[in-house]
Image: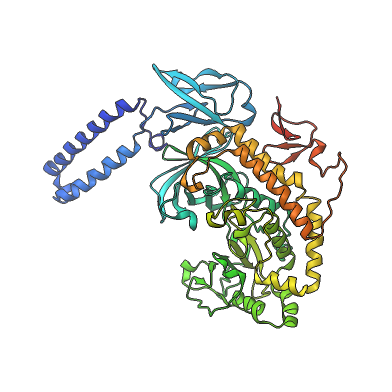
Amino acid sequence: MIAHRIGFTYQDNYLYVIPVYLLVIMFTTILTWLIYKFFPFITGKSFKTTKQLLFIILSLFLFALPAHSQLHLNGKEIIFDSLTNTYLATIPQQSFGSDYICQIKEIDNIDYTFKNIQPNKKYSISIKDKTADILFTFLPIIELEGSFGYDYTQGFVSYNHPDNSQIETYSSSIKWRGGSTNTEEKHKRNYKIKFDKDVCFFGLRTDNNWILDAGQADVFRLRNRIATEIWNDFAQKPYYASQEPDALSGVRGQVVEVFLNHKYQGIYAFTENMDRKQMKVKKIDKNTGKIRGVLWKSKGYGALMNEVPDYNNQEEMWNTFEAKYPDFSDNDTTDWKTLHDAIKMVIEAPDNTFSEQAVLLFDIPVFIDYYIFINILGAVDNVGKNMYWAVYDQTKSKMITPAIWDLDGTVGQRWLEIYADIFSSPQYDMTYTIKLIDRLVDLNTENFNEKVRERYKELRNSVFMEEKLKQRYINYLHILEESGAAEREKERWSGDTDIRGEIINFKEETDYICQWITKRLQFLDNQWNYTTTVTPVNSENNISDHAVYTVLGQKVSKKNLSKGIYIKNRKKIIVR
């Protein structure tokens, strides 16, 4: 990719690259001596400076020199995987299951037909007496180029969408991200990306901050992505939605396949970032400098609200909360008072005072949804942790509303080895929760318990119907299998220490998740006194009505379907 950007091309294989490297080194060494000997004014007569200059030139040249032949389908370069010596091309989904006709630049742009495109099938072509193996996917491909670590470093991000005629390349600052997923021994890294300009992907928000979520500890890789989509589909809007209708308490994203320096890294979710912009909280008043909207992230279980230590507005952390807006790095100050006072009230206020103040200080309808959500998905690692807490404009209201984050430890995920069998059990009783909900339940503030049961009943007859909930995961299984990404992920990461040495098998993991969902809903139905409603076979709310879904899980009309792959009654159908 870099070679393509600077206009350098090299059309040979590894055996030819090695002598070229040696020739470049010899040439650079001679050039260094000549500059020092005959043109000392360039570097101020300093041989050390001359060497530094030529080293930079040499490094740039060697970095730009690709160690593989470039291939272009329909004018677009396809990505080479140095781990398997194969190319991966992304093409429109409707091309799968049929012949794909394209032009190949390296063989004089003649029409070339790849017969009957199938996932994870290698197609060999001959170019200049050499053979190249090509795989196809219909998922977007992201390639990162550069050397990355715990701090931001400059690099490039190439975005290759199956429907685009060209690859889009952006200069970016990139670093590893995460907490427990970001320790030294980890392999499949998460990435935080700051583009040099605002960019829009997949019709989502336009911004320069994006995240590549590896699903590092998740054998299914997409638990976090799916759980967040569920939340986005049903959760009630924040209390200030009438003023900010676009406010979101969850991030959106797209499944992609990722390369790092021409090495396949596997399945990722390319997502928005949770921040002030996502939740639409008010910016600092430019005229007065007064802090209006505030946003905090709970990085530990301090949000269980069992203690209320003193705070310091000159510190980025308080308790286990991190100040996210205002950005502490901008002015080394924040405002903890609203959060501190709310938690102090929850912990210390007498019952009557609590009941009066809770509905004024907390967005109760959204907290009810959060309570039901973490229970249904068994989100043990999201009880007070991995949450965002926002206030829209504290100069007008101190009310706090929650946002969800980092939900890979859901639907039976064995995320903590020592307690895996306990926390991943579908019968695990999450009787503990954040102190706010504990007191709302104990006091039944404004009929809180009845509201929870009514909301649960409503959701069980809609988004949390057993078959609908299972279908979320089944649909993504089809995406991964039909694109070939499932097999590539298995070959790349199966047995890795990131997943505790487990073998990746997406079909088996989907079956496990579906069985877990059945048992979990039975457990909660009993706990919250819910009786399953018998729904007619042809109801729009029942999956057995043979409704048609895209591979992304979106329900579509059966009439006038365009070309593509769909899911009907858990089976794949192809419309040509």
Residue 177 position within the rendered picture, expressed as x and y whole percent measured from the top left: 48, 54
- Residue closer to the observer: 73 or 87: 87
Residue 343 position (above or below residue 481): below
Where in the figure is residue 421, as x and y percent of width and height?
60, 53
- Report the label total: 0
Q: Is residue 443 left or right of residue 338?
A: right
Q: Quadrant of residue 298?
A: bottom right
Considering depth in this image, is 29 or 337 the residue closer to the camera? 337
In the rendered view of the protein, which quadrant contains the C terminus? Answer: top right
Name the colouring of the figure. rainbow
Quadrant in the picture for the N terminus: top left
What's the residue at 78%, 69% (across, down)? 448
Q: Position of residue 45 (x, y in %)?
A: 13, 50
Specify whether 46 is left or right of 479.
left
Q: In the image, is 7 to the left or to the right of 73?
A: left
- Quadrant for residue 28, please give it: top left
Q: Quadrant of residue 21?
A: top left
Q: Is residue 178 visible?
A: no
Height in image: 533 above or below 77? below
Q: Residue furthest left?
A: 37
Spot occupied by residue 325 in the image (x, y as percentages of width and height)? 55, 66
**What residue lies at 35% left-to-right and 37% top-to-bottom?**
64
The answer to whether residue 541 shows anywhere in this view is yes
